Image (tube, grey):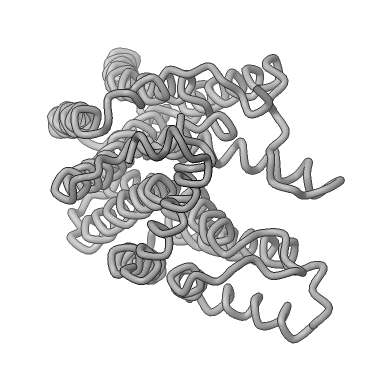
Amino acid sequence: MAELEGEYIWFRPMMDTIAQQLLERVSWGLKTRLYVGAGLSMMDLGTDIFMIYTYWISGQEKSALSLAIMVGLCILLQVAAVVANTKNDPSLGVKVREVLIVLSGVAPGIHAMRVGRGEEKKDHRVLDPEMELTITRVLELGVESIPGCVVQLHTLLTSTEYSKRALFSIIISALATGFTTATISFDYDVTPAKRFQNPEFYGYIPDRASRRTLAFGCMIMNGALLLLLRSLSTALLLMAGGKWWLAYFGGDMVLYFAYRVVRMDFWHWVPFEGTAMVIFSVLERFFVKVIVDFTGIVQFRAPGEMGGCYWTFSVIMTLVGSIVALRVSRGVEAATNDMELNATATFNSTSTLLDEVEPAVAWLGTGYIFFFLAFLKLIKPEFLVTFFSTQTCCA
């Protein structure tokens, strides 16, 4: 076959077409990932709504309001994305239907069904179903799942009572996030068209079924563990005082935006125009940075998103940041005890709390490193360079 590929220019496109048709006929793996992911997303939304009610009736109004705002903002941004995607559609009924799908909370399932059926991009749409599903997932991760996990962890740590319901909701959020990020990366990589169009980036998932399954499992664990680790670090900084979190998060985000501007790689490649292009680029760069920091999604190391070099830098900073958050918490605890300024921090039985949290941070960080190294061992070695690439979208 290698000789045929070298001798006949038509051989490789023909084989890619045959492979793609076979995958479309035997698409149970893709459909399983899509529908399980959609189910977990809707379950995550359901547990968030349940926790809003639980916080409200238990007197934790701030936590309930924060979580409600996140859920509402996620739905609002999804509606805005639908409006932008269908703005050229002449049918008002279609626009209303798409908005109602989002408002009903079943958008992940509907979008997954469209991709699973192999629907093509419609003439009046800006995005194809696959990209539309990806944007829906990104918005859920960046606006609901990730900040929701931070709020629930912060509430759990500052509460005087242990809540199994809150812990269950946090675990669901972590698993849903891990599965979603793994599915995005996996499905993009194994698509024959993607591998044909960009063979230097796509194709890292191994060909053997057993190794593919292990690689997918490692990506799920990577996303779930990093979410818990970063969320726990963020909760600790918020407990130490809002200025610590603002300095860390704000400084990290300013550095990233400056990096993209200096490299003349700020505008996103999605074909919006005018004001929509500006708004989408700012929001997309912001959400991609947040999602990579909290989940380490492998797909976003692409040159058109974060880039391999900065992706690796962000993951390392998340691991280091967890240690810094513990040190800051210890420092604030000591200063509070020495100066008797208990109003400057929100710790309750701080020494005991940090003694319990410190092993959790260690185990989460160690677990992430273990599964990530296992993932690197499983993928094809020629793609390791993509984790350190300095290529930009315009290159």
Q: Position of residue 142 (x, y in %)?
A: 50, 48
Q: Position of residue 313 (x, y in %)?
A: 42, 18
Q: In this view of the protein, which residue sits in the foreground, 215 or 315?
A: 215
Kindly identify the residue that appears in the image at 27 percent across and 59 percent down: 172
Q: Position of residue 372 (x, y in %)?
A: 23, 31
Q: In this view of the protein, which residue sits in the foreground, 215 or 44?
A: 215
Q: Is residue 318 left or right of residue 243?
A: left
Q: Compared with residue 365, is residue 115 higher up or lower down, i.e. above or below?
A: below
Q: In this view of the protein, which residue sits in the foreground, 131 or 19?
A: 19
Q: Position of residue 263 (x, y in %)?
A: 67, 16
Kindly identify the residue that appears in the image at 48 percent across and 40 percent down: 8
Observer able to see residue 39: no
Q: Is residue 314 left or right of residue 139?
A: left
For the N terminus, the quadrant is top left
Kindly identify the residue that appears in the image at 59 percent across and 18 percent down: 255
**Going by the picture, which residue comes out furthest to the right?**
274
Kindly identify the residue that appears in the image at 46 percent across and 74 percent down: 117
Q: Is residue 270 left or right of residue 215?
A: right
